[in-house]
Amino acid sequence: MFPLRIFLLFATALLIAGFASVPALAKPNVIVILTDDQGWGDLSLNGNANLKTPRIDSLARDGAMFERFFVQPVCSPTRAEFLTGRYHPRGGVWNVSTGGERLNINEKTIADALKASGYVTACFGKWHNGSQYPYHPRGRGFDEYYGFTSGHWGDYFSPPLDHNGEIVKGDGYLADDLTNRTIGFIEKHKSGPFFAYLAYNTPHSPMQVPDHYFEPFKNAPLAQRYPGPQKEQIEHTRAALAMCENLDANIGRILKRLDELKLSNDTIVVFFSDNGPNGWRWNGGMKGRKGTTDEGGVRSPLLIRWPAAIKPGTVIEPIAGAIDLLSTILDCVGAKPVGEKPLDGLSLKPLLTGQKTNWADRRIFAHWNGKISVRTQRYRLDDQAKLFDLVADPGQTTNVAAKFPDIANELKTAVSKWRTEVVGDVRNDRRPFPIGYPEFPVTQLPARDGVPKGAVKRSAPAPNCSFFTNWKSTDDTITWNIEVVTAGKYAVDVWYTCPDDSVGTTIELKLGDRKLAGAIAKAHNPSLRGQENDRVSRGGESYVKDFQPMRLGTIELPKTTGLLTIQTTKMTGTTVMDLRGLTMTLQK
């Protein structure tokens, strides 16, 4: 059923025979590659005959493959757990947008720890754990950041991106661009030690991929299909598979460059995904997909290559999770966590390096939108308290709670305790959006984080890459709940588009008794874009426009917390503007 997997198991002895035990550097380099919405089954390594991923598969051949590795059902929770080694509700992450995706400021990350241990650090790609400093990657231990901080983006071809807080234009297809940036970082810091966190945005929708990768899939029959009752959208699957093959090519470029620079032996390369597949497609017969706490929603590949210490073809059976990656990587490089909060994860180094250890059975929890499931080595108690034997029944078809009542009750108790102690009231989120840190003076307040009132609405249901539109009245307002960290003068830029008849319309910004007003002096009315690159119709994601900044002026603000409100006081046409967001810059 899994030819490559079987090959790995049989070939391990031969590979070990040729394995040279070379002493590792005191501080090996670290590259963590995280893909977005790529399911466990989206690899040829795991038996998917619909695509080929030889470069990613090579990480298992040349390193270690985990049989049962678990993440969370959606993006930002998994990312928070990787960064902190702690379950995501502990860090305040409960949503994927509008502020709920933010990792609490008092949490310490793997980048904090590696930086303290002498590493130069960088993050490239989708962040999804907060936009405003110090939620921003530059406030979480990363020396460099290039990508987007939102949960998804509206166009993958030369989109606007964030480079260390500055809005810049991307260069070509985003996954290719992120790979180029990562390779450039490796080349610049080849003397090491370096830590690169490459968080790809694909195959998350919108389903966009260059022609070179899509054409082979355009009309291709699929040898393997989703077997469940839900309907597979074939065009979506084809686009996702093409995006996965693009990822494979890009990861191959990184591995090749490591070889060329003679860095492979002492570079730890970690590969995993953030949740299950973003569509009903072949996934090894597992139940569930992205957004569910079932096996198919939370099982991810985990491949780790470190030639200096991990024998080729290593296959690891014990269950593991995203919460384990921080402890594992720090243990491998000889670094320590820098925070004082207890970790939920374990170091997997003994399993990776073949040390003799009595590895006890454990529980790994999955949580999303109030639903919780728990996994042991053999069983999963799902979010409806049904018990499944995943060894005998990997598709979760038969509830065995009545057959094993003691196990079911034990896991029910564990879930109840975890809900109380870990989840708590995490959804009761009143954190404001901070502005005004002198070390990071530019703060973006995107539409995603604002609240429209009156007739104003979002450009699409999903807030992440939306903008505000239908602003047509002096009664309409848009607000952001902000905290001004530093009293002082702030230059305000409004990122807008508007038609000709909006010229002369007056905009007012206010916080408490402080006000700033200015008039639209120039029309800017570009067309929506993004649809020209879509391979299938998108769902909740917004199309985008090329917004430009308009300097509204400078406002002096005290150190305070409150609602920052923008509205119009005089209209000259039928609409005010479409608003992508504000930029607040603390003046020196």
Image (cartoon, rainbow, N blue to C red):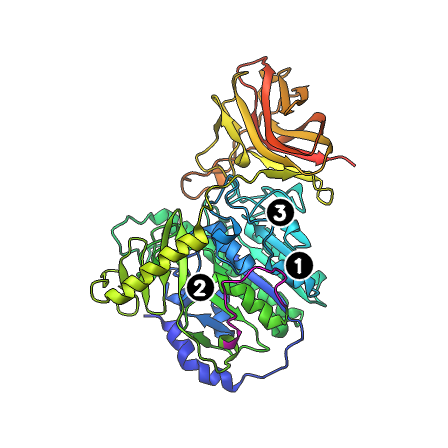
Along the line of sight, the residue nearer the viewer: 113 or 271: 113
Which residue sits furthest right?
A: 588
Disc 1 residue type (three-letter): Thr
Where does residue 414 sit, x and y in percent of width and height? Answer: 36, 60
Where does residue 175 sit, x and y in percent of width and height? Answer: 55, 52
**Numbered range of the magenta stretch:** 336-350
Disc 3 residue type (three-letter): His
Q: Magenta stretch containing residue 206, yes or no?
A: no
Of mark 3 and mark 2, the one earlier in the sequence is 3
| Quadrant location, the C terminus | top right
Q: Magenta stretch containing residue 348, yes or no?
A: yes
Q: Secondary structure at mark 2?
A: loop
Which residue sits furthest left?
A: 402
Closer to us: mark 2 or mark 1?
1
Where does residue 207 sit, x and y in percent of width and height? Answer: 45, 46
Along the line of sight, the residue nearer the viewer: 475 or 531: 475
Q: Of the numbered discs in the image, which one, if any, rests on residue 301?
A: 2
How many marks on residues? 3
Mark 1 — residue? Answer: 121
